[in-house]
Amino acid sequence: MYTKETSFSRRMKQAEQHAASLLQQILIFVLIFLVIFMMVQIQNLHGTAHVVNYASLVRGATQREVKLEITGTANDMQIEYLDKILSGLKYEDGNYNLVSLKDPAYQQCLDNQIEYWELLKEEIYTVREKGYENTNVVSMSETYFEYADETVTAAEQYSEKIAARIRLTEIISALDILLLIFLIVQQQIQHIQAVRENHILSKKAYLDVHTGLPNKSRCEDLLNSSGFITEPLCFVMFDLNNLKEVNDTLGHAAGDSMIANFAHILRKVVPEKDFVGRYGGDEFIAILYDTTSGQADELLEKLHATIKQYHSSNMPDAISYAYGYSYSMNYKDCTLRNLLDKADHEMYLNKQAQRGCEKRIVPKKKKDQEFIMNSRSFFLL
């Protein structure tokens, strides 16, 4: 049941990640489209602003032309100039870089203005022949002004429509970007969570559940990844002496308790900077970095004192152990694996020495240590 639920949860998480990735790709494509669309609209807005300016210019220039004609000053160049502007507004020709707005209302107003401009031009030519008093040029110019004003207004309204599209596009783009940021942040959070979960799983994979210490797999990885040692380092191997006896006489629960208690005491005594791991059922290792042999002896004495103190209040749970250690500075081109082998051999000698003694010896004087530690190992209870 647990496996099925875990598998279903994993599939659901993968589906969610796939959906989020797909949505992110869609949002990116939408954002690209919106950016292109906005650029086109901005270009159109610039063209529309140009049109509005020239449409307004035609309106004012026509009024000036009529005034000149009324005063008897003919100006064919001005009429030609106005013709070219109106043609540019309608057909995008000429030298003024004008565009024809794709707006029906504007085009209708422009057609009306151009049509009436042709009538106004005829009336201007009549003014030149008969004088403005005998024509309708003034009233027609006012009517033309209204047509021109309608054209300018239609161009401005079209410009406002484009500006409104740009504003709407900006809002949609901002929402798109916000959603993209949300998805990216969410993915980053999920990635961090996944890394943490993997780290926890990795720690569990290398953790001895019973003692809380790194297990043999972690110890082996450490041993296999080590190159030649150049700094002072002490490798200590521990072995519980009476685990089988405790298991046989008091039960496995008592044996497990002894293992856990020893692991706890060992980890408490050995500094945090140093490595402590469970190497096997009743075997433990400690790697003391940047440590002299004298400092290692002091630490092992401290361990013995801590065990002895533990015994004073837990006599039924007496812990007996043997150990051996090797010191990196005593060997040339050695690895952790080499030091393990040497420490294991020293521990074996220590265990054999214990079996040959009716009373376990605790070295307290230097001469006793020299006698028992001749092979760099001694035993404690």
Image (cartoon, grey):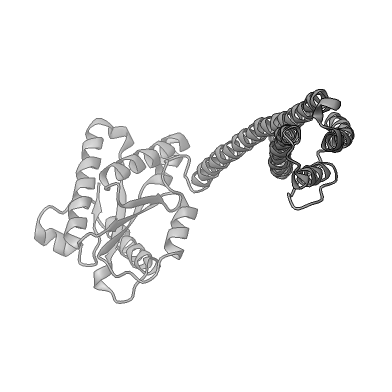
- Residue 266 in which image quadrant: top left
Q: Nearer the viewer, residue 152 or 113?
A: 113
- Nearer-the-camera pick, 173 or 249: 173
**Closer-to-camera residue (84/287):** 84
x, y percent for residue 53: 69, 37
Residue at x 82% of width, y 50% of height: 93
Location of residue 353 with respect to 34 vertically, above or below: below
| Residue 7 appears in the rendering | no
Using residue 141 as the reference point, say whether residue 353 is left or right of it: left
Res. 142 in view: yes
Picture mark count? 0
Query: The N terminus is located in which quarter?
Result: top right
Estimate the x, y position of residue 302 in percent, counting from the top left.
20, 46
Q: Residue furthest bottom?
A: 332
Residue 350, percent from left and from top: 29, 60
**Which quadrant of the view contains residue 158?**
top right
**32, above or below 132, in the image:** below
- For the point 36% across and 53% down, the residue is 239
Q: Is residue 309 left or right of residue 49?
A: left
Query: Residue 300 at what x, y percent from top left?
Result: 22, 52
In the picture provided, is 234 more to the left or to the right than 113?
left
244 and 33: which is toward the camera:
33
- Which quadrant of the figure has residue 59? top right
